[in-house]
Every structure is written in C-alpha cells, then in structure tokens.
Image (spheres, rainbow, N blue to C red):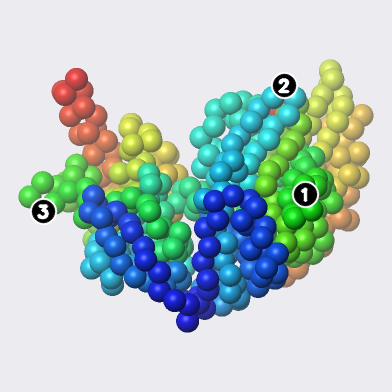
Amino acid sequence: MIPAAFEYYRPKDMTGVLSLLGEHGDNARVIAGGHSLIPMMKLRMADVPHLIDLQGVGGLDDIELSANSIRIGAMVTQHDIIDHNGLASAAPILREAALQIADPQVRYMGTVGGNVANGDPGNDMPGLMQCLDATFTVVGLDGERDIPARQFYEAAYMTAREDEEVLTSITMPIPAGGYAYEKQKRKIGDYATAAAAVLLTKEGNTCKSASIAMTNLSDIPVYSEEAGAALVGSSLDDTAIKAAVTAVLGDIDPSEDNRGPVAFKKHLAGVILRRAIERAWSRA
Amino acid sequence: MSKKQHYKITVNGKEEEFLAEPRELLIHTLRERLKITGPHIGCETSHCGACTVTVNGKSVKSCTVFVAQADGTEITTIEGIGSPDALHPLQEAFKEHHGLQCGFCTPGMIIRASKLLEEIPNPSEEEIRFGMAGNICRCTGYQNIVKSIQAAAAEMNSAKEAAE
C-alpha cells in the first residue's frame, strides 16, 4: 500500500499554496488531514504528483462565534468540533454529527474543510452544511468568493470549487430550534447507509420552519426544500411527516452497493428521516 | 521516484534524523527505519488501529500519515510509556485483567487508551467503548479490554490523589 511518488510542499502561507496550485494545475492537490486523500493515493486511485500540505498555513484552524453567526476554519478537525463547548452550545448539531463520523483517531486528523471540499457523497458534513445553510469561502489567485453549500455540489467529487482554489472557511447562521443528525451505518467508521440532518423551529405546537438534507443517498448531498415545506404549518402529525418522507424520496437517487439495494436504501431513508424529524421536534 | 528529503522527528523523547521519500508511511518509518516495532501493521487501511501512535498529542493511525507530514512532530509509541521493569498502569492492568489474548492489537489499544485517559480520567464503560472504537481486537470480545482500562483509570486516579 505505497502510493506513487510525489513532490511534497509545506508552504507557510496561502500565497505559497496558490502559486504552487497555479504552477502545477490539476497535477497538484492540497492535503489537510489526509484521511480521505491518503487512502485513495495508497490505492493509486488518486494520482497526486504534487502534494501541498496546508498544515504550515496559519489562520485556518479557528472557530469564531459571533452573536448570530459561526465561522469555522477549513483545518478545524472533527475532534476540535466535538471538543469546543461554545460551539456545542451554539450549534449542538455539529457535535452530534461529528461524533458519528469515523472513529476517534480519524476525527483527530479529519478536517471539516476536507470533509466538505472533497465532494465524496459519503461524507456527513456536506448534507449537514446544506441543512444549516452554510456558505463556503474559497480563495484563488483572483481573490476570495463565497459559495452557498446548497449550490456547491455538482456530482460525486465534482464541486463548484475550481482546481486552483482552496476552501478556507465555512460560515453559517447560528441555528435556532430543534435539531438532529441521524445516521444509520453498518459499523463504527463506516459511511452512512442513510443519514438525515434536520433543523426545526416551532411556535406553540406549529412547525414554523424546517430544513432537511440527506447524506449518501445520491451522488451529491440532497437538500430537500419540498420536504421542509411539507412540515411548515403542521403540528408534525403523521400526515405531515409522511409528506416530508415522500418529498425526500422524490429528491434522492440512491444506487445499489455493498450497503444494500435501492429499495432498502429508500426504505431506510424514510425511517432515518422520520427519526430525525421526531428527535428535532422533541428538542424544538 | 521523488528525491529523498531530510526529516527530523522526535520519537519517545529521542530525536531521529534521516533521509526518506516523502511518500513513506509513518508506520514504515517507525518499524523499518527506526526499528520501533511496537506499533503493528494490521490492515494498513486506517481501520484496525494496530498502528496507533500519539503524534503531537493526538491518537493517530500511523499507516495514514506520510513521513513528510510528520516532519517536526513529537511521537509516542508503546515503547515510550513503560518498560518491562516499570510497566505503565495500563500495561499492568491489561496483564492483570487479561486485556489481550494474541496481543497483536495491544500496543495500539494501550497507546490509544493512554490518550483517552488523559482526556477522560474516569471514563464510563460507554465512554471507553466509544473512545476505543478505532481499535479492533479479534480475540477478546473487548470485555476484558474495557475492564483493563477501567482498572488502570482507578489505579492512576488513586496514585494521583495520593500524590496530591
């Protein structure tokens, strides 16, 4: 399990990273925690002649909380997310999701930026960030631009980020109301067979707003506007939940793999979504 | 082949300097280059945890780190926490409570548990099982591993209290 040879760089600042990316184009990749990229390189499924390590670039591992928004640097690890009490009280869904990713060792290394930028449909953070209506900031030689998470994913491993750009941070409004990240996996460390991210607010016994996104049930994360709309105005009775499940089943497009056939995944998507909605409602 | 580079890492308090290709995996550096053979290669695909070492205070699967990334870091392996004459409380507890059978996963288990007990000095059974979930054991069924970690935690906590 030895990857092909590569040139390794550890630039001290983003200017250095961007000039290497400019010089080597798609022969270069940046590496953060490496726990998605290194396995692919070892399998020789990813060919990376020029590997640019972001660990020497400062300013990418901060978690900043303001009155109504959260900014998470791209190099913040899953472990950092779990360990940050301020973040856990401002947006507990982040810790709930991070605890369900991989295993302890991988969470010390795996970064939020890598998880969202990689474009792997199995990653949990992309769907979560769509649910939270997060914005990704990328930087290139022409400067910074912001891309909404809900518009970032184009196909498996294909995103709105250009090859010569680097994702530097994620910004999101502080979520209100109840939340749940519900994930079904075969074992610790596995990707989701199905997972659902749900945010709900309620007024009296009526659902006032709802945001729903699904993980690993299509080649991209699936934010289902229609599923959220099916809950708004209801008291989350069975009819409303069934309508949300029906809407999600219309939006996902799972494929058969070693986690099960399509019919099973659709069934499971409904089960997981219902659980997530009920848990989020109980916390709203 | 890319050219060999000069690297410096500190392993168990000893500074090591050598030339290696950047693609060399840290587990191979430790085992084959530095002859530190406590960390084992089980799956070599970041699943089993037998290669776990502590890198700059984090439990890391050393099969999924390039030596180039580890340049400048401080690493602790099972060899760094105890010796045959002065076992670490975790080593003593694994011996006492049958926390191993074949022993292959044990170096990874113990070095991971040492970090877990730093973070949670008095863990519940659930916290131990969750915190050890990145380490696989094919022999014990985990029950005695949990017991060993609980016993080591109790021992370390009472030693700490006695010292205070």
Quadrant of the image occupied by residue A63 = top right
CA separation, marks 3 and 2? 55 Å
Q: Are marks 3 and 1 in contact (CB under 8 Å)?
A: no
Q: Which of B149 and A164 is in front in this view?
A: A164
Relative to A30, is B146 above or below? above
Q: Is A88 positioned to the left or the right of B158 in the image?
A: right
Compared across the picture, whether B65 is left or right of A89 comes to left
Q: Where is residue A226 in the image (x, y as percent from the top left)?
A: 91, 45
Q: Name the residue under label 3.
A: B84
Which of discs 3 and 2 lies nearer the camera? The answer is: 2
Judged by depth in the image, the label closer to the viewer, 2 or 1, is 1
Q: Which residue is drawn at 48% across and 47% down?
A: A108
Q: Residue under mark 3: which chain is it in?
A: B
Are both tags, 3 and 2, on one chain? no
Pick the front one: A152 or A269: A152
Label 1 belongs to which residue? A143
* Viewer-closest of A251 and A219: A219
Q: Dot 1: what SS?
A: strand
Q: Which mark is residue A104?
A: none
How much space separates mark 2 and mark 1, taking CA atoms? 27 Å
